[in-house]
Amino acid sequence: MGIIGVGNMGSALVRGIIDRGIINEKSIIICDIDNNKVDILCKELGVIDGGEAENVTNLSDLIILASKPQNITSLLKQISNEVNASKTVMSIAAGVTTSSIEEFLPKIPIIRVMPNLPALIGEGMSIFCRGAYVSDIDVNRVITVLDAIGICSEYSEELMDSVTALSGTGPAYVFHTIEVMIKSGIEMGMTKEMAEELVLQTVYGSALLAMKSELSPTELRKEVTSKGGTTDAAITHLTNNDYTKIVIEAIIAAKDRSRELGDSK
């Protein structure tokens, strides 16, 4: 397996695969324009420094493109001569379609993936879609990797910009909400440490409850919203200030930006 680009998500893939014992570290070859990132992973995990992207591509059965979307065109030109139909190319570049990659890598199995940041702790949500030349072998290669960093599902490519906006970008919405909740605790007289403990456990516990409960999130919210109570006061304030509308419009803005990134390639 070769990984081109070992930033947050690329390195999360490497760590997840090694932690799960899916692939031997000596069978993982990596590269990045930042040599320091490569050195750190090689020393810490025992993976192989592949040097240049062409070399990583040549030596790998599964090639993971984890570079930034704005760099994907130049990267594809760089590796195109080293790719053949026996290899699987997995791209995690936001907004970049399988068909746009196939323009540079014709008749090559391309699988587009949108993972998210909780992959760093093995709790990621990854959605993938397949290009025109993908076989079950290619899909199984990718699922093996994605299962190492959380859970995965296959969607149609038409939904990938929406997936990017909802789950790919989603952790940032949660973190932003956590930030604001902590700030409110501080403004009410708590220390930062007190507020963080309260908020983080509340968010963690609420997410687990939502996943394990037979009740829907809406039903759970109603369970703790007594008429005229404290929760009712908070929810009413959010409703009166168009909270739902603002959140939906923000996520749609992320979707539109994902599409723009793809169109600019």
Image: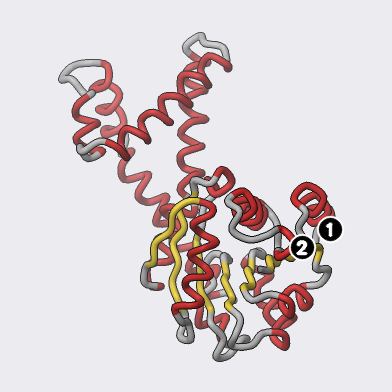
* Residue 229 position in % (x across, y down): 22, 16
The x, y position of residue 180, in whole percent, is 49, 29
Q: How is colour applied across the structure in the image? A: secondary structure
In the rendered structure, find residue 35 and report the number of the disc placed on it: 1
Residue 77, quarter of picture: bottom right
Pick the residue in front: 205 or 150: 150
How far from the left and from the top, in percent, is residue 159? 37, 67
Numbered tag placed on residue 32 in the rendering: 2
Residue drawn at x 79%, y 76% is: 55
Does the CB distance between marks 1 and 2 fall below 8 Å? Answer: yes
The span from disc 1 to disc 2 (Cα, nearest Å) is: 6 Å
For residue 155, above or below residue 149 = below
Amino acid type for the residue under numbered disc 1: Asn
146 and 255: which one is in front? 146
Residue 98 on image: x %, y %: 51, 78
Horizontal side of 62 relative to 154 (left or right) equals: right
